[in-house]
Image (cartoon, helix red, strand yellow):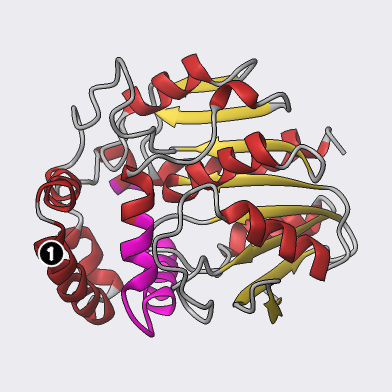
């Protein structure tokens, strides 16, 4: 798998580390990866992109990898970085998909970048904290419940834990990942956590956290704070995927989003978990291409 990494400058002087792969002369699709984040792209997704004429683009969100930190950023702030990436690569129109912690950032692009973005897909996205009618924590793996509630109740203690968790993540091996995620892996996700996928995830996490925990911390804060946009303003095509076997981000998050995104093409499946949605990426990318 061949990809290219570049550093671009934003108008406010920050650096963003960007990765490109697939068919670099094809139709551009930007990926918002999960949390912890890294620009690194999953090999099968890149191969599918190359086969189907997709120029796949990803980046380190601020504070991850080699991208300058942006403390206090909101979910909506990502749209300025997406615009900067498009400008730097001379892209006038692109599609977007985001998975897990990248889902809210993809939805921000749907709401706030109608002149640049033609369509968006959201996979296993968290929903807004405190949203009316949403039981945010029901069915969530205990590790994620504990981390989010600590951030809400005691930010100072949460920040200390974030530093310690980063140190632990930098030491974890792909073989240890199953144990580290004991409360989060449903049988569906355990079945797809192959050595190849586990190795990719561990490499991705270590790359994103290599210089510190700031990006991870800012992601967590942004997810639980107001996102900075309204779903009602979304007019472009949006596809949503969420699985009933998801313990990282439980099913009701996808159900809530499907009820609040205008005109959404929702795929709420009984068989999928969280990690299994990586297998849906070829379908997602094929769906996105029809809107260019």
The residue drawn where x is 37% and y is 76% is: 209
**193 in the magenta segment:** yes
Q: Position of residue 150 (x, y in %)?
A: 12, 51
For residue 244, say whether it is visible: no
Main secondary structure found in the magenta portion: helix
- Is disc 1 surrounded by few (<14), some (14 to 19) or many (20+) residues within 10 Å? few
* Viewer-closest of 220 and 286: 220
Where is 61 relative to 253, above or below? below
The residue drawn where x is 44% and y is 73% is: 63
Helix, strand, or loop for circle 1?
helix
Where is 19 relative to 31, above or below? below
Quadrant where the C terminus is found in the figure: top right
Q: Quadrant of residue 170?
A: bottom left
- Left/right placement of residue 227 relative to residue 120 reads left
Q: Which residue is mark 1?
A: 156
Q: Quadrant of residue 211?
A: bottom left
The magenta region covers: 190-219
């Amino acid at each position: 798998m061949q990809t290219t990494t570049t550093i671009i400058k934003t108008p406010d002087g920050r650096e963003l580390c960007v990765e490109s792969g697939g068919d670099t002369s094809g139709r551009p699709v930007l990926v918002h990866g999960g949390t912890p984040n890294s620009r690194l792209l999953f090999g099968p997704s890149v191969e599918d992109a190359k086969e189907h004429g997709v120029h796949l683009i990803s980046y380190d969100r601020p504070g991850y990898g080699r991208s300058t930190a942006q403390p206090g950023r909101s979910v909506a702030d990502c749209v300025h970085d997406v615009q900067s990436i498009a400008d730097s690569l001379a892209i006038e129109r692109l599609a977007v998909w985001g998975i897990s912690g990248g889902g809210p950032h993809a939805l921000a692009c749907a709401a706030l970048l109608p002149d640049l973005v033609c369509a968006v897909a959201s996979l296993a996205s968290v929903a807004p904290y405190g949203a009316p009618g949403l039981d945010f924590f029901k069915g969530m793996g205990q590790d994620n419940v504990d981390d989010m509630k600590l951030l809400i109740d005691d930010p100072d203690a949460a920040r200390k834990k974030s530093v310690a968790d980063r140190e632990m993540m930098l030491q974890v091996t792909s073989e240890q990942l199953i144990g580290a995620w004991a409360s989060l892996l449903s049988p569906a996700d355990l079945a797809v956590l192959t050595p190849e996928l586990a190795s990719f995830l561990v490499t991705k996490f270590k790359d994103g956290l290599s210089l510190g925990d700031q990006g991870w911390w800012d992601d967590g804060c942004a997810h639980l704070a107001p996102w900075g946009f309204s779903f009602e303003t979304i007019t472009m095509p949006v596809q949503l995927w969420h699985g009933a076997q998801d313990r990282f981000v439980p099913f009701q998050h996808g159900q809530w989003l499907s009820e609040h995104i205008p005109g959404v093409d929702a795929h709420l499946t009984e068989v999928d978990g969280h990690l299994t949605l990586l297998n849906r990426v070829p379908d997602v990318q094929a769906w996105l291409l029809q809107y260019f």
